[in-house]
Image: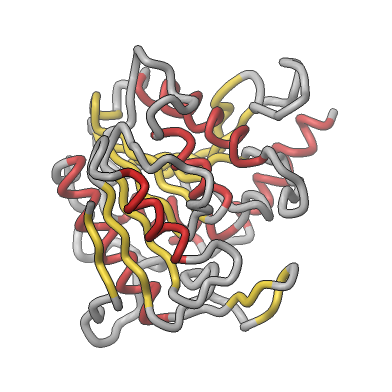
Amino acid sequence: MIDALRRAALALALLALPPAARADQLLRVAPHRATIGVPANSPPLYGDLARPAGPGPFPAVVVLHGCAGFGPPDIATAARLRAAGYLALALDSLGGANACRHPGGARAEAEDAVAALHFLAARRDVAPGRIALLGFSMGGFAVLDAITRGGVAPATGPRFAAAVAYYPNCRRSSGVMTVPLLILIGARDDWTPAAACRALLVRRAGRGAPVSLAVYPGATHAFNVPGRAHVYLGHAIRYDRTAARTAWARVRVFLRARLGPPASSPPASSPRASAPPPGPPPLAPQSMERR
């Protein structure tokens, strides 16, 4: 019963979006979500699949949400990736719950990411070896967990080719990554401070795959999510259009460099409701560090 209600809620969330921003299909990705402290009879893991037109195979990206759970920003990200020529799978790791006050959510989301990797690797329309991972906030922390040496990813089988973490918690990661990583964070983030990610670069001491860090001046936590400025659990949240556009442009360049060009590009006449709004070229971030 709960499973049916959750599927209905996800379907309604998709229908609430503008047609051009809706992703293609709601799928059951795995028989169970990874839930810390809960046995293997947890509810199924669902994902929102945004697939470009054409036969493929396409490079793919798994999208992980923040601690507030799966919602329109995640669906919009999947649609944006689809518009860029990637097959995107946005996961619902919390099933409608909010994990912002509870520990363990990032670890469970990292395990869900590995399940999604296997799901995509088995699809004929996904290019083998060209699957990336992208996450926001708690999902960004899950990204680190999923690709850190000795993390949740198994030693054998499919592997992510690259990863992107928006404003993750960098405090508890060794920084020794198994695949190239791009971190995007605001200089005024008081929830997941940029200083912790700079410390990660020092801590890794050049070990593992390369890590790049982009810090955006004046940007807070969740700087890329449109909406009114507010305070959530004591932390400042403010949309920064310039930082959002600059970060997304950098993500596009990073994914192309690490996954190769998309199998096909959408025609110029195709709808791009979730593309960055028109305006001046993106500005360079305050700092870009690679170690």
Q: Quadrant of the N terminus?
A: top right
Residue 157, quarter of the rendered image: top left
Asked whether the viewer can see residue 169, the reply is yes
**Residue lying furthest right:** 1
* Left or right side of 66 for 182: left
Q: Nearer the viewer, residue 48 or 247?
A: 247
Indicate the colouring scheme. secondary structure
Which residue corresponds to the image point at 31% horizontal and 60% vertical from the top-left?
Answer: 213
Percent of width and height locating residue 214: 32, 65
Can you see residue 22? no
| Residue drawn where x is 77% and y is 32% of the image | 4
Residue 184: give x, y in percent of width and height. Answer: 38, 62
In the picture, measured across the screen, residue 13 lies left or right of residue 203, that is: right
Left/right of residue 102 with respect to residue 142 in the rendered view: right
Which is nearer the eye, 46 or 24? 46
Task: Provide residue 114's location: percent of width, then percent of height.
Answer: 47, 26
Q: Residue at coordinates 31% horizontally, 46% vertically from top-left? A: 181
Vertical placement of 248 versus 65: above or below? below
Q: Position of residue 215 (x, y in %)?
A: 36, 70
